């Protein structure tokens, strides 16, 4: 059974001075999920926002809030992100020593559990936690910034992860450098959730977000 193709705009590329309006605009423009990038200036070389800010913009949309934690440690903050309104909480496998425990903690908070892998991290690290996972987020750039170029080696990793999960109900999400040009490659390899920041928010208006989302979705679905 193939899982539905979903587009998750990364609000990292939105105008932070009016983030609530930007979320409303991408929601109306056809976003399936809202992808929130949390960075700590330690695990990644950039700082964005934390749980109180997510709580503040949570009322802007009823869609799934897909919270990508690029923070180390993550465990002490999981409850805060759950309380702020995250629906999916994704941690990095590289960010802590006890992945199994962290994933268990996310589900114990009643949230969907995701794990993210940096481009250089082999997929074997998730082999023994597959039954604790709702989502696998494969980075196709080194995390920290929007607007970077897609790393083609991730395509083979997607294929391997797809094979590894078998019939389990796990989403495969790809993040970084997704455009109408790269989307077909990752979908063909087995990804079903596409994060896109700069490719969605270029243009700065709801009409351009609608056209940008449609272009990614159209390119992705034309291959399957
Ligand atoms: C990068 C973030 C991404 C980023 C993607 O560290 O995890 O979600 O916003 O931006 P684009 O789509 O511009 O590569
Ligand atoms: Zn992200």
Image (tube, rainbow, N blue to C red):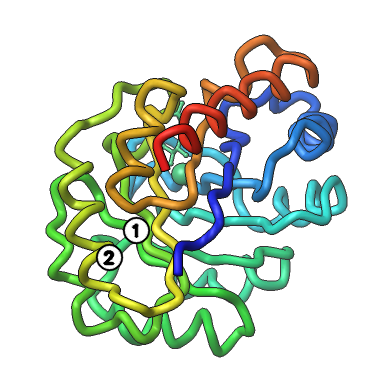
Query: Which numbered disc covers residue 116?
Result: 1
Q: Residue at x 55, y 74 (%)?
A: 112
Q: Is residue 195 left or right of residue 163?
A: right
Q: Is residue 213 above or below residue 136?
A: above
Residue ID at (39%, 58%): 172
Disc 1 is placed on an element classified as strand
Q: Provide the residue designation for mark 2.
A: 93
Where on the picture, by quarter, is residue 166? bottom left
> Do the residues under discs 1 and 2 have CB atoms within 8 angstroms?
yes
Answer with left or right where residue 185 lies relative to residue 157. right
Q: Position of residue 118 (x, y in %)?
A: 24, 49
Q: Earlier in the sequence, mark 1 or mark 2?
A: 2
Q: Does mark 1's beta carbon lie closer than 8 Å to ligand 2? A: yes
Residue 7 vertical position relative to residue 205 in the rendered view, above or below: below
**Which quarter of the frame holds ligand 1?**
top left
Residue at 71% over, 15% down: 208
Tell me: residue 204, above or below residue 97: above
- SS of the residue at dot 2? helix
**Residue 156 % position (x, y):** 16, 47
**Mark 2 surroundings: few (<14), some (14-19) or many (≥20) residues within 10 A:** many
From the viewer's perspective, tell me whether residue 47 is left or right of residue 185. Answer: right
Q: Residue at x 56, y 34 (%)?
A: 217
Disc 1 packing (10 Å; few <14; some 14–19; many ≥20) = many
Q: In this view, does 160 lie above or below 78?
A: above
Pick whichever, 137 or 159, lies toward us: 159
Which quadrant: the C terminus?
top left
């Amino acid at each position: 059974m193939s899982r539905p193709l979903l587009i998750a705009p990364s609000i990292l590329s939105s105008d932070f001075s009016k983030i609530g309006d930007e979320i409303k605009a991408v929601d109306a423009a056809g976003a399936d999920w809202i992808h929130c990038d949390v960075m700590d200036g330690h695990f990644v070389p950039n700082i964005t926002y934390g749980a109180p800010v997510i709580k503040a913009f949570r009322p802007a949309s009823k869609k799934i809030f897909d919270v990508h934690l690029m923070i180390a440690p993550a465990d002490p903050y999981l409850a805060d992100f759950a309380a702020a309104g995250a629906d999916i909480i994704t941690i990095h496998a590289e960010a802590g020593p006890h992945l199994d425990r962290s994933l268990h903690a996310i589900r114990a908070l009643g949230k969907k559990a995701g794990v993210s892998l940096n481009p250089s991290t082999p997929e074997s690290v998730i082999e023994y936690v597959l039954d604790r996972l709702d989502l696998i987020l494969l980075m196709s750039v080194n995390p920290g910034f929007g607007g970077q170029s897609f790393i083609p080696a991730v395509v083979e990793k997607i294929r391997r992860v797809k094979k590894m999960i078998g019939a389990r109900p796990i989403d495969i999400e790809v993040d970084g450098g997704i455009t109408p040009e790269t989307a077909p490659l990752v979908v063909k390899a087995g990804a079903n959730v596409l994060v896109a920041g700069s490719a969605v928010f270029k243009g700065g208006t709801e009409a351009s977000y609608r056209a940008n989302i449609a272009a990614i979705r159209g390119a992705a679905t034309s291959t399957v």
